[in-house]
Image (tube, helix red, strand yellow):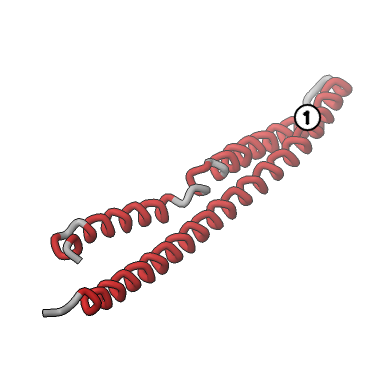
Amino acid sequence: MPGPAENTEPTGTLLSDVVTGLGRLVKGELMLARAEAGAGLRMAAGGLVKIVLAAILALVGLNVLAGAAVAALAEAGLGAGWAALIVGLALCVLAIVLALAGRAALRLRGLWPDRALRGVRRDAEAVRAAMSEEGVRHV
């Protein structure tokens, strides 16, 4: 019949393997979370670039609209002023479209590492289930 000293060595090895495996698992989940957060930040940066471009186009559009208003008042008829008005309005519409696209890209759904968190929850449930099995309780 084996004594207590002989029975602790396999248990110690088993616990060491479990701790090592959990360490690797946590490290992998952290790497996944970092990759997801990096992708979210890249998307946010793209959204900020679009907003900056929209602001620049809006300023140009407002400048052209102001020039169009001045030209329209000076000429009091259809001519160069109305053409500038049409161009200014087109630039403002483009700026609005870019601003809306930039705002959509800045939504926070890409900044939170959802997949990594789901993986950590799934792993924790698997460890809990494995620890509650009949064979593990008696170790």
| Identity of the residue drawn at 26% across and 58% down | 126
Q: Position of residue 49 (x, y in %)?
A: 67, 48
Q: Position of residue 127 (x, y in %)?
A: 28, 59
Tell me: residue 42, above or below residue 52: below
Say how many tags the image has. Answer: 1
Left or right: 36 as drawn, with respect to 136: right
Tell me: residue 43, above or below residue 138: above
The residue at which mark 1 appears reads as 65
Name the kind of residue labelled 1 in the image: Leu
> Considering depth in this image, is 61 or 101 the residue closer to the camera?
101
Q: Quadrant of the C terminus?
A: bottom left
Q: Residues within 10 Å of mark 1 (few under 14, many from 20)?
A: many
| Identity of the residue drawn at 26% across and 72% down | 11
Q: Residue furthest right?
A: 74
> Considering depth in this image, is 29 or 2 the residue closer to the camera?
2
Per the image, label 1 sits on a secondary structure element best described as helix
Left or right: 100 as drawn, with respect to 1: right
Q: Quadrant of the N terminus?
A: bottom left
Q: Position of residue 9 (x, y in %)?
A: 27, 77
Tell me: residue 112, above or below residue 10: above
Tell me: residue 60, above or below residue 44: above
| Identity of the residue drawn at 36% across and 56% down | 119
Left or right: 133 as drawn, with respect to 96: left
> Considering depth in this image, is 78 or 60 the residue closer to the camera?
60
Q: Position of residue 102 (x, y in %)?
A: 60, 42
| Identity of the residue drawn at 81% across and 33% down | 63
